[in-house]
Image (cartoon, rainbow, N blue to C red):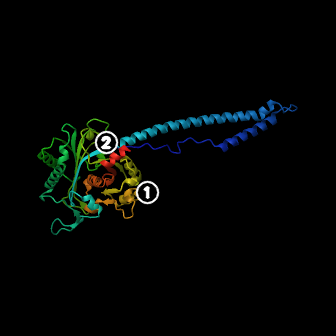
Amino acid sequence: MPIELPEPSSDKERPTPLNPIVWLVLLLGGLAGGVAWTLLTWPKGQPTGTPWFWMRLLGYPTLAWAALFGIRLHFHEEDSNHLAAREEIRQADREEAIVFGTEPLAVLGAVYLCAMGTDGVPGRISQKEAALRARTLERRMPAVRHTRLVLGEDGGSIDRYRQTFQALLQAVDAPLRTLPPRAPFDVQLQLPREADPESLLTAWNTCWGNCDLRPAETRLAPASEGLMTLDTWLDEYGGPALEKFTLFIAVQLHDKPPENSGEAAAALLLGWAPLAERRDLAPIAMLHRPVACETDGIAEAMTTAALFGRVKPEDLPHLWQSGLSRSDKAALLKVGSEVALGAAREDELPGVHDIDAAIGNPRAAAGWFATALAIEQAQQTQSPQLIACRERALRLAVVRPVAHQSRTETT
């Protein structure tokens, strides 16, 4: 469940301060009333130079005004103290929520497959290279702008997924074998909505068994969950649900590619950071809690994502976006300029990387594929990266290099 940060008290909650002009007018009005009352009721023939005359004339009105002022001041101070106590509790809750929200996951392995290759793709996308172009799959078929994974044997749909699974497992084999044998471990498989989940799950289990890896439970994750699966993971307060390692697999292939689509796959091996540290596993990067929002809430989400990533928006020089609509992209750039996002600082926007323009929209794999590219770029540049993708909603997350993480924790 997304973390809600308590907001500071608004001006409407603050008690109305005492207005000195109002109270001065009340004092003068009370004195005038006392003078009028005394002069009208004072017995004729009695001297006016007595203390009783002046007490009725000025003393009683002043005492009445002072009593009213004291009561009003007392209630004002009580309201102020009550608000200060609530604000102190709210601030403590906010700091606790921020500490809870900034806990990252350790990235132990991250690999990807796309039409541009399996390595060095972030650098090429940064240079505005693209593989997306119109091509035909069969004769006499109209050309469609898309990219397609080049696999060893171009067989049927299930066979292409099987080859993709094998390629991902081979690439992530080394970090998988470093996991402690008794540590909790599972696999989450994210596939396109139109795919046959049971057949692909069987193909995955076969590939897993052929790799001679430890037994692992595999769960089919809905494509709508995407990166927010990490939010659910980090919401746990302890036990195997939190202290574990998980391999996330996301694959998007097409039998008949839609316009401007791209085939892509990604595998991310993540673990609870303290557990990885206890087991002496060296992470390659840190992935922080994602934040979900709609287009009209990007400003708050971007600020929160940077807060959870322990970095200021101006210190995020790279933005990796995928699966976004035109309105999403426009709003993202507008908000980025307003919050001084590092990636949106220059007019040419060299730090904004549109994955869809390079390889097409990876659809079901958009979030995880963008994360894998951001992780590689973070390793190479040693700078934090911002991810923006649309799954069921817009998701923002920060990836930090390990060296940057260590420097922040020591300062």
**Relative side of 143 to 328, left or right:** left
Foreground residue among 101 and 36: 101
Residue 239: give x, y in percent of width and height. 27, 35
| Residue 338 numbered mark, or none | 1
Crowding at mark 1 (Cα within 10 Å: few <14, some 14-19, many 20+): few
Q: Quadrant of the C terminus?
A: top left
Which residue is situated farthest in the right direction here?
Answer: 45
**Relative side of 86 to 290, left or right:** right
Residue 199: give x, y in percent of width and height. 15, 49
Q: Is residue 261 visible to the viewer in this orientation of the structure?
A: yes
**Relative side of 239 to 299, left or right:** left
Residue 387: give x, y in percent of width and height. 32, 53
Residue 188: give x, y in percent of width and height. 22, 46
Seen at 70% across and 34% down, the residue is 64
- Residue 231 picture quarter: top left
Distance in Å between CA atoms under marks 2 and 1: 30 Å
Q: Quadrant of the N terminus?
A: top left
Foreground residue among 72 and 112: 112
Q: Is residue 40 above or below residue 388?
A: above
Q: Which kind of residue does numbered mark 2 sit on? A: Leu
Which residue is situated farthest in the bottom direction here?
Answer: 140
Seen at 49% across and 37% down, the residue is 86
- Secondary structure, mark 2, is helix
Q: Is residue 143 above or below residue 95?
A: below
According to the picture, the residue beneath numbered tag 2 turns out to be: 234
Q: Is disc 2 in contact with disc 1, using a CB cutoff of under 8 Å?
A: no
- Secondary structure, mark 1, is helix
Q: Is residue 405 above or below residue 331?
A: above
- Residue 92 picture quarter: top left
Q: Which kind of residue does numbered mark 1 sit on? A: Glu
Q: Say which label, 2 or 1, has the lower sequence index.
A: 2
